Image (cartoon, grey):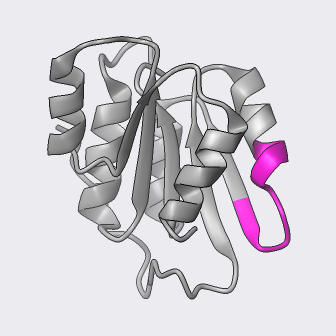
Amino acid sequence: MLTSVKNYPVGCQVTQTTAQRRLLVIDDDHAVLFALKRLFDSPEVEVDTCDSLESAMLLIDSNCYQLVLTDLCFSETVLDAGIEISAYIKSTQPDAKVILWTGSEGHSLKEKAKAARVDFFFQKPLSAQIIKSIMENLYF
């Protein structure tokens, strides 16, 4: 289990009333990062992207996120890195919502995601429309 280097930024209020919402996308596929940043980046939504566990932790430690979209297996060195980063963000920014996706199958993955307090867990492929619908359901 990951341990926090520090608590999330002082005064970090992760609420749906925040004027500019912040989204973090984590995936090792740079095409996915590029596509999702283009899809969601707007004057109302600031999108950060990263492709490693270390980068994700640094971003989480220095920013307030309302939503994190993460692949399960985005790290070559950490098995189920998406579960680890989901648990990490929930421990440091408990109001942040997490959407986790994977190309893998298995009942144990769903149980791990539930234990990490993931809000939505899906199998790939995932269309942009499905992601948008989920985000609306999370009031993002």
Residue 65 pos. (x, y %): 51, 65
Give left or right: position of 127 versus 111. right
Name which quarter of the figure residue 30 lies in. top right
Closer to the camera in the image, 121 or 130: 130
| Residue 93 spot, x, y in % from top left | 35, 67
How many labels sit on residues? 0
Residue 39 among magenta residues:
yes
Residue beneath the point at 71% across and 33% down? 33
117 to the left or right of 140: left
Q: Residue 35, percent across and down?
A: 79, 34
Residue 42 lies, with reference to residue 87, above or below; the image says below
Q: 7 or 26, which is in the foreground?
A: 26
Q: Which residues are magenta?
A: 37-46
Residue found 54% across the figure and 66% down from its top: 63
Q: Quadrant of residue 31?
A: top right
Give the quarter of the figure containing the N terminus: top left
User: Whole-percent x and y of residue 112?
Assistant: 18, 32
Quarter of the image containing the C terminus?
bottom right
Q: Relative to 76, does residue 67 appear above or below in the rendering? A: below
- Residue at point 50%, 51% (across, down): 68
Q: Is residue 2 left or right of residue 21?
A: left
Whether residue 114 is in magenta: the answer is no
Q: Residue at x 43, y 88 (%)?
A: 11
Placement of 18 over or under 89, stated as above or below: below
